[in-house]
Amino acid sequence: MLHNYLEKAIAKEYDKVKQEDTERQQKYLDENRVRLIAIYDKYFWEMKPAAKVTGKEQPKPRLSDNNAEMIPVRVWRRGRELYDTSAFERYGVRYRNGRLVIPVSGTYFVYSYVGFFEPCVPSTGKPNVKNASIPIKLGIFKFNILDAEESELVSSVQPHTISSNRFFNAYSSYVSTFADLKAGDEISVKVSNITYLRYTRDNYFGLNLV
């Protein structure tokens, strides 16, 4: 019990210090942008905003998800959870409720990979879904509170197939695109069925200023 308490206390304190450090760095950049440009010239701006977060087990679906065409991936591994991985958060990109927040306006390369796991009916191998005509979909979306609307940047769809092993289907889906984004835009990933994200270790979502 003491070990668990200390582990939680340390993690909480670490997150607090990390957040304070990030805010302090961002404040310094905002207050000294002109002076830094003069000192570092193009080398400073080669430190382009970029981030890559990785898959994590999702919380239980909400009631509002039942009738939604696309459901947001609400949590990703980030911050200290990314240690010893190939993922990262750099130069001002912030994470908020499963979304990546754009720090400066510009053209970004956005991308995501998701593996879907679909259960099937053992006797027939057919997907165990209510409506097989609705495809499996992965999409990346943009939202800005000032625009008060959400738009799709890119997506991919795949049809349901008969299982070769009669028990399940595994689908791999990757999407990417270049997009002109504004500071404050929030980028998210959505899928047609959140329960298909059963094995999330290899999933990822990222962006970088080009």
Image (cartoon, helix red, strand yellow):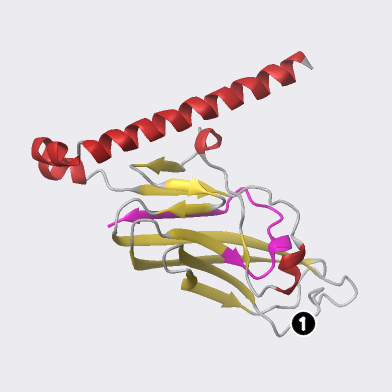
Q: Work out which quarter of the rendered image holds the N terminus and state it.
A: top right
Residue kind at label 1, given as amino acid type: Asn
Range of residues picked out in magenta: 190-210
- Does the magenta run of residues contain 116? no
Question: Residue 119 versus residue 184: which sits nearer the camera?
Answer: 184
Question: Residue 80 versus residue 8: which sits nearer the camera?
Answer: 8
Q: Is residue 85 left or right of residue 40?
A: right
Residue 25 picture quarter: top left
The spot of residue 166 in percent (x, y) is 82, 70
Q: Residue at x 56, y 36 (%)?
A: 81
Q: Residue at x 45, y 58 (%)?
A: 186
Q: Residue at x 21, y 46 (%)?
A: 46
Could you say whether the residue bearing mark 1 is in a helix, strand or loop?
Answer: loop
The spot of residue 198 in percent (x, y) is 71, 55
Residue 181 picture quarter: bottom left
Q: Is residue 11 left or right of residue 1?
A: left
Q: Work out which quarter of the rendered image holds the C terminus and state it.
A: bottom left
Residue identifier under label 1: 131
